[in-house]
Image (spheres, rainbow, N blue to C red):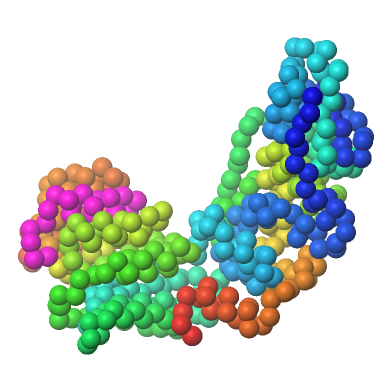
Amino acid sequence: PNVKLVTSDNEEFVVDFRIAKMSVTVSRLMEAMNMSETDDASLLSNSIPLPNVTKAVMARVIEWCEKHKNDEPKEEKENDKRGRTTHVVSDWDKEFLKNDEFGRLCQLMGAANYLEIKGLFNDISQTIANMIHGKKSDEIAEMFNIHCDLTEAEKKEIRKKTAWCED
Amino acid sequence: MELNIKIYDQNRAILEHEDHISGLPSLCLIEVLKNLTRLDIHNIMTVNKRMHALACDRSLQDVKWKNCFLSIAQTTRGYGFALDVDIVKDYPWGEDPRYIYEIYEDEEGKLVEKWKIIEKCDKDQLPKNIVPHNFNIPNKFFEAIKDILRYHNVENVRIQQCPSNAQFFFQLNDAFSGQRIDRFQCNCMISHLPVSRDTRTWFLKLIKTVKTLDLIYTPQDLVNEQFLCDIAEIGVENFYGDFYGRPPYVRLQYK
């Protein structure tokens, strides 16, 4: 059975029921609309509106879900040399996410968050964390074009508080 | 059927600004920060105001500086502790940082708290041969331990010349909540009364993750036969103690 998903730019995606169920948000909506796997009529007559996801992002989400539709539910973590807890991102996922510009990666993360697709969300959050890891404050700001609204005095104050000392 | 779907403008924000990351919801960014080290989070704090607020989120308190050594001891006037951080290259405040805290009562009976951070210190500078005093450890002392351990993970703890009673161990348990202590050492504990069952119970809770336990120079009545069975059960791999409390010391070690 197939499920129709409609994006914010009115693009309709017809996806396998199993893929639709990978999103907790879509699952809940289907339940609310009494759509079930065994009731073809309910699946045909309804479509799931996804106003927070654009066509381009949805296509990437579906591509990821297609690849992972047979995965066992698991969350692999490991500790790196410095004791950092990291999610294990498979080689396929690394390659998949490498193709996206950073802006698109953020959109994809927003979509994974909204659609509640944990595996995709974890892959992206780990990818962004890897970009930040080991960089200094100004390097992070420069890499992500973040405008710093802190004064030097405020920065000093923050560092002082973090150092937990009087002076 | 009408659906109530919350629409937020994250897509628009991402399209309108080059700063893509700031367009993400706070919860997403916090999840990213959970995959970083404490040093990374420290660096994030001074990126901008929003990042600072996110980096201070309570859910990130499990990301701590590693390999810390905490010494708690009686001082000349009150009680204090010193926290050594042993990851020189990762720490942004110079070499071998040591946090020092002390609490005592001044001449007018007012509580005084002092804390500082020093670098390049002599590791073994805890006060020695202190004349015992009757200053009761106030709650603020344990609050200060809690405060420093929010961002530090202690693997190694040494307690010296502190009261060996249930209240002290109970409050330490609370202060050490969430810590995984690997090595625990108690020296010259002060005990005016026989060690009670409660004292032993709270002490055992305190060392539940400990692999190496050093109780040489600890009041002998803390260690009885039942205590030895209990520490074997909780998985202590190395135990050092002076049986019967008099020389020559019998050092027990089992694996």
Q: Nearer the viewer, residue A146 or B238?
A: A146
Q: Quadrant of residue A76?
A: top right
Q: In the rendered view, does A148 fall on the left or right side of B171?
A: right
Q: In the rendered view, does A154 fall on the left or right side of B237?
A: right
* Residue drawn at x 59%, y 45% as measured from the top left: A77
Q: Where residue B201 sits: x, y (%)?
A: 21, 49
Please, which residue is most extreme toward the bottom here? B107
* Residue B135 visible here: yes
* Residue drawn at x 28%, y 79% as measured from the top left: B111
Where is B131 relative to A12, above or below?
below
Q: Where residue A82 sits: x, y (%)?
A: 56, 61
Q: Where residue B29 sits: x, y (%)?
A: 68, 55
Magenta segment:
B191-213
Where is A115 relative to B217, above or below?
above
Q: Nearer the viewer, residue A47 or A160?
A: A47
Q: Nearer the viewer, residue A116 or A95?
A: A116
* Residue drawn at x 57%, y 77% as measured from the top left: A159
* Residue B213 visible here: no
Q: Quadrant of the N terminus of chain B?
A: top right
Q: Tell me, yes or no, whether the highlighted magenta stretch contains residue B211.
A: yes
Q: Where residue B168 sits: x, y (%)?
A: 23, 61
Q: In the rendered view, does B232 fall on the left or right side of A16?
A: left
Q: Quadrant of residue B158?
A: bottom left
* Residue drawn at x 39%, y 79% as measured from the top left: B115
Q: Tell me, yes or no, whether the highlighted magenta stretch contains residue B146.
A: no
Where is B191 relative to B205, above or below?
below
